[in-house]
Image: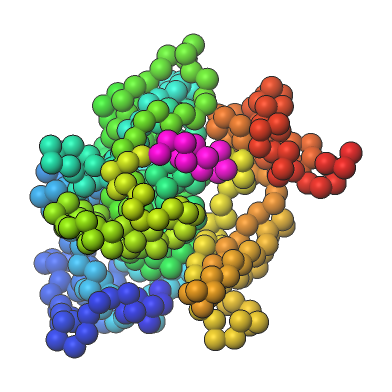
């Protein structure tokens, strides 16, 4: 963990910084092992229990968040002490080594929880749930209208067999209007608190992973069907480990097999997505309350603040035409089509903004590229920097993809475009339609010349 970066994200200076806590949970740990000099100060009490028999406790709403590690607020959001976590990391970062040395006690505990969940999932009989279509309602928590109803929500039909990572990248992000591959995220099975997230994630906010559950199972290995079992079940989605945008996703309908065709459809929605980097659900709750009572002039200023965010760079209209409570289903469908028509995002090279001292210098975050990967830079001269992201021109693994035309997850039945060989289709019919409507302008020039 880069402590310098972590400090830079904290709005605390001087007397605003709380002292380091020297308290620790009572008793001896039942499973984890400490190195000399570490007595567990700043560590949640849960880690002193035995992970082999640990039973997480639900919060006020009967749901289990973040593996059940943390206590809860009254609104069912988990409670953590980020400052004491930081102090703990600073005190012991040179003692523990998760990559071959003595692992952190927290990792010792989490590895057992993950193994237990992995074994449970390996024995789970989905009873064809993964072959059925579902209707889900996604809403941003803590943001309610005057009647107490969700102020920002989307309703979508799709296959329960879609991989969780594909869902986040190619459906949820474009449907909500979050920027693809910009921030880290998690999904939580609220029945037992198990957490799923992006493998090899490289976004800056990964430094806050301890605040969102310490570790997770790779979301490209499991399906939406692994997160619920019946109508009425809910699972959680957290976007951006720093800002923390809390979503809840409810299963409203499960279609029978004979009525399931796998296509992704946006059915309805309400409210514009918050601006990226607007400091999360709690701060945006205050933002909306102030907006509702502001004068027209002040409302225009707040609209400009939203439109200055990365996810609204392409809005292309004056603030007076931005309706904070509207939902443009046509724009959402355009974003969805574009996402489905592209390869999966490369989590090891997530989008980041850089303000270089020397514009020609190599970026130290680039790392080693895999076959078909390249670095894409988009300069933003007004901000004196550029956006950088690793992209891929090779097709996704069939088990971790979906039809570029309809979004159906077909596994080994998906067929590759014979031109660019970068995207997949569930049928020849869908390939023909998609070629005419979308892919003809995307496919390789070599193929177009034939």
In-image side of 364 versus 318 (left or right): right
Identify the residue shown where x is 23% and y is 61%: 297
Q: Residue at x 58, y 70 (%)?
A: 379
State whether residue 59 is above or below residue 204.
Answer: above
Q: Assign the N terminus to one quadrant of the image.
A: bottom left
Viewport quadrant of the C terminus: top right
Question: Residue 374: x and y, percent?
Answer: 68, 62
Taking the spot 40% from the left edge, 28% from the top edge, the residue there is 267
Q: Which secondary structure dominates the residues rendered in magenta? A: helix
Q: Please tell me whether residue 378 belongs to the stretch shown in magenta.
A: no
305 and 274: which is toward the camera: 305
Front-lying residue, 395 or 303: 303
* Residue 49 seen from this side: no
Residue 446 image position (x, y, % from top left) = 85, 46
Horizontal and vertical percent position of residue 206: 41, 64
Would residue 285 appear left or right of 403 to someone viewing this image?
A: left
Image height of 354 relative to 316, above or below: below
Res. 12 in view: yes
Look at the image and say whether residue 337 sits in the magenta stretch.
yes
- Expressed as whole percent of the image width and height from the top left, the position of residue 242 reads 33, 64
Residue 302 sits in quarter: bottom left
Q: Which span of residues is magenta-colored?
A: 328-339
Kindly indicate the quadrant of the structure image that contains residue 303: bottom left
């Amino acid at each position: 963990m880069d402590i310098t970066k972590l400090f830079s994200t904290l709005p605390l200076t001087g007397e605003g910084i709380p002292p380091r806590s020297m308290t620790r949970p009572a008793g001896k740990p039942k499973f984890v092992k400490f190195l000399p000099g570490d007595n567990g100060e700043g560590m949640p009490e849960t880690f002193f229990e035995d992970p082999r028999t640990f039973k997480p406790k639900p919060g006020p709403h009967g749901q289990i968040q973040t593996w059940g590690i943390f206590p809860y607020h009254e609104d069912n959001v988990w409670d953590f002490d980020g400052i004491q976590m930081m102090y703990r990391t600073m005190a012991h970062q040179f003692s523990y080594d998760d990559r071959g040395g003595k692992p952190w006690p927290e990792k010792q505990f989490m590895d057992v929880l993950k193994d237990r969940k992995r074994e449970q999932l390996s024995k789970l009989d989905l009873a064809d749930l993964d072959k059925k279509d579902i209707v889900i309602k996604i809403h941003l928590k803590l943001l309610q209208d005057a009647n107490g109803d969700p102020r920002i929500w989307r309703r979508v039909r799709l296959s329960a067999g879609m991989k969780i990572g594909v869902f986040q990248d190619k459906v949820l992000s474009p449907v909500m209007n979050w920027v693809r591959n910009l921030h880290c995220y998690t999904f939580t099975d609220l029945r037992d608190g198990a957490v799923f997230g992006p493998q090899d994630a490289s976004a800056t906010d990964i430094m806050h992973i301890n605040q969102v559950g310490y570790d997770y199972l790779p979301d490209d290995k499991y399906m939406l069907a692994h997160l619920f079992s019946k109508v009425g079940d809910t699972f959680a989605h957290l976007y951006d480990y720093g800002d923390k945008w809390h979503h809840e996703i409810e299963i409203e309908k499960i279609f029978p097999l004979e009525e399931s065709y796998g296509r992704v459809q946006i059915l309805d929605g309400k409210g514009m997505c918050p601006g990226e980097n607007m400091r999360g659900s709690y701060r945006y709750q205050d933002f909306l309350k102030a907006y509702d009572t502001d004068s027209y002039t002040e409302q225009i200023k707040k609209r400009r603040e939203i439109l200055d965010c990365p996810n609204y760079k392409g809005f292309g209209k004056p603030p007076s035409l931005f309706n904070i409570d509207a939902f443009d289903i046509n724009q959402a469908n355009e974003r969805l089509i574009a996402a489905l028509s592209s390869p999966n995002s490369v989590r090891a090279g997530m989008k980041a903004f850089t303000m270089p001292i020397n514009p020609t210098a190599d970026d130290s975050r680039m790392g080693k590229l895999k076959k078909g990967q390249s670095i894409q830079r988009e300069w933003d001269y007004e901000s004196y920097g550029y956006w950088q992201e690793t992209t891929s021109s090779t097709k996704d693994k069939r088990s971790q993809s979906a039809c570029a035309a309809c979004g159906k997850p077909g596994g080994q039945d998906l067929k590759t475009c014979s031109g660019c060989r970068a995207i997949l289709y569930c049928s020849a019919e869908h390939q023909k339609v998609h070629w005419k409507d979308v892919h003809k302008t995307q496919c390789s020039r070599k193929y177009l010349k034939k």
